[in-house]
Image (tube, rainbow, N blue to C red):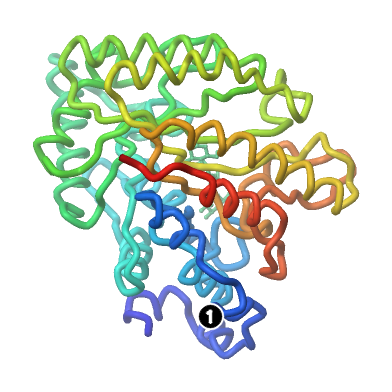
Amino acid sequence: MLTRRQTLALGAGGLAAMSAPGLVMAREDRGPSLHELAQAKGMRFGSALGVSPPGTVSGAFHDPQYRQLLIDECGVLVHENELKWYVARPDAQTFDFDRADIIMDFAEENGMEMRGHTLLWHHTDWFPDWINNHDFGSRPGTEAERMLTEHVRTMVERYRGRIYSWDVVNETIDEAGRFRQTALSRHLGEEVIDIAFHIAREADPDAELLYNDYMNWEAGYERQQEGVLRLLERLKARGAPIDGLGVQGHIGSGNYDYSTGFDTAREDTWREFLDDVVGLDLSLSVTEFDVHDKNLPADIETRDREVAELGRRYLDLMFSYPQTKDLLVWGLADQYSWYQEHWVREDGVAKRPTPYDENFQPKPLRQAIADALIAAAPRP
Ligand code: G3I
C-alpha cells in the first residue's frame, strides 16, 4: 500500500506498472534474505534508493519490481540523493523534503530502518550554487556557522528517531589526502566538520554519527587513507562526537584515473588503515558497496565470477572487524547503478556491479554477499 505522496510521485504510469507480473523470484524460493543473514550475526543489510524521475538510473523507486526486491532483501535503506544539500535545499530559505519523505515512508511501511546521507557533502562540486555564491557579510564566520547549524539541526530534528545513523560529513578528503576547501571552510576552517557533528549530536543524541568517504583498498588510495586517518585523529582530539567511519566500498576498476587494474587490492596497507581507525574507538560501516567491472572482459559469466570473487574477498576482510555492523550496497540491481552513467566502458556494454541483474535475477555477487554474511562471526 502506498501513501498519497508516493502515489502522486509514481503517477498513472507508475500505478499501471504496479500490476506488472513480478519477475522477482518468490521470497520462499530464495531462502533467507540478505538482511536475515546479516541479522543472524547482529548486522544489517540494505541498499540505496533514489526517487529521481522515472526511467532514470537514480529513479528506481518508480519500479515496482525493484521496490519488491528491496522489501525481500533489505532491512535498511539510504537516500541516494534526496537528502543532499543540493537536492533538499533549492534556495537559502527552503527545505524540500518531499522526495526524501517518499523513501522514508516506504522504508517505514515495510519495516525497514533508514540511514541518512548526507548532512554535509563537504565538496564545492556538490554545494548548491547559492552557497558557493553567498555573501557571508561583515562577520562571515558567524554567518557560515548560522547557515550550517540551521541546515544540520533542521535535517536531523525532522527525522529524529527515524534515521538511526547519519553520514554527517561526506568526502572532505581528496585523493591526495588534502582537506577540501569550500565556501564554508573558507570562513570556519576545518572546524566546519566539528560543528556539523556537534549540531547533529545535539539534534539527535541517539543517532550514530559517521564520517563517510571513498578511500579504498586499491593501490593509489594510500594518501587518501592517510588523510582520512589524520582527520579522524584531529576530530577525536578536539572532542567531536563521531562514532565511526563510513567506508563506501566502491571497489573494482575504473574509478578516476589511477584505478585501472580490476584487482589492485593492497590488503596489507588497507588492514593497517582499518586497524588505526578502530584503534581510535570508531566503528566501521560499509555504506555504498558495489564492484566496478569497467576493466573486465565483456563476457558476462567471466565478469560476474570475478566481481563475486573480489566482492567476497573484500567483505571477508571488512567483516573480520567486529566493528563492522552494516553493509549497504549502492543499488541492488544493475540497471539502477550509478556506474551506468560514469566511466562508461569502451565497448559500451552495461555494467554489472550489483547483486541482481536487470531482470531481477540473483547473480554470483548476491551469493558472495550471502556467503560472507554466513561466514562472518557474530558481532559482540
Ligand atoms: O535530478 C536531476 C534531473 O532533473 C536532471 O535532468 C539531470 C540532468 O543531469 O540531473 C539530475 O540530477 C542528477 C542526480 O544524481 C539525481 O539523479 C545529477 O545530475 C547526478 O550528478 C547525480 O548523481 C548522483 C551523485 O552521487 C552526485 O550526487 C548519483 O545519482 C549518486 O549515485 C551518487 O552517489 C554518490 C554518493 O552520494 C557519495 N559517494 C559516491 C556515490 C557515487 O558517486
- The spot of residue 52 in percent (x, y) is 50, 60
Q: Is residue 55 left or right of residue 347?
A: left
Residue 107 seen by the camera: yes
Determine whether, in the image, residue 265 is placed left or right of residue 246.
Answer: right
Q: Residue at x 15, y 41 (%)?
A: 153
**In the foreground, 223 or 12:** 223
117 shown above or below 229: below
What residue is shown at x 17% (from left), y 46% (from top)?
154
Coordinates of residue 148 in the picture (x, y in percent) = 21, 31
Is 325 situated left or right of 254 in this image? left
Look at 58% across and 84% down and name the residue there: 17
Task: Tell me if mark 1 has few (under 14), some (14-19) or many (20+) residues whose alpha carbon lies within 10 angstroms of its own.
Answer: some
Q: Is mark 1 within 8 Å of ligand 1?
A: no
- Residue 359 sits in which quadrant? bottom right
56, above or below 233, in the image:
below
- Judging by the rendered image, the residue that carries numbered circle 1 is 14
Locate the N terminus and report the quarter of the image it occupies: bottom left
Figure label count: 1
Nearest the viewer among 261 and 310 is 310
SS under mark 1: helix
Residue 126 vs 363, above or below: the answer is above
Q: Is residue 127 visible?
A: no
Q: Position of residue 326 (x, y in %)?
A: 40, 45
Q: Quadrant of the C terminus?
A: top left
| Type of the residue with mark 1 | Gly
Q: Residue at x 20, y 23 (%)?
A: 144
Query: Can you tell which quarter of the image residue 244 is in?
Result: top left
x, y percent for residue 370: 57, 54
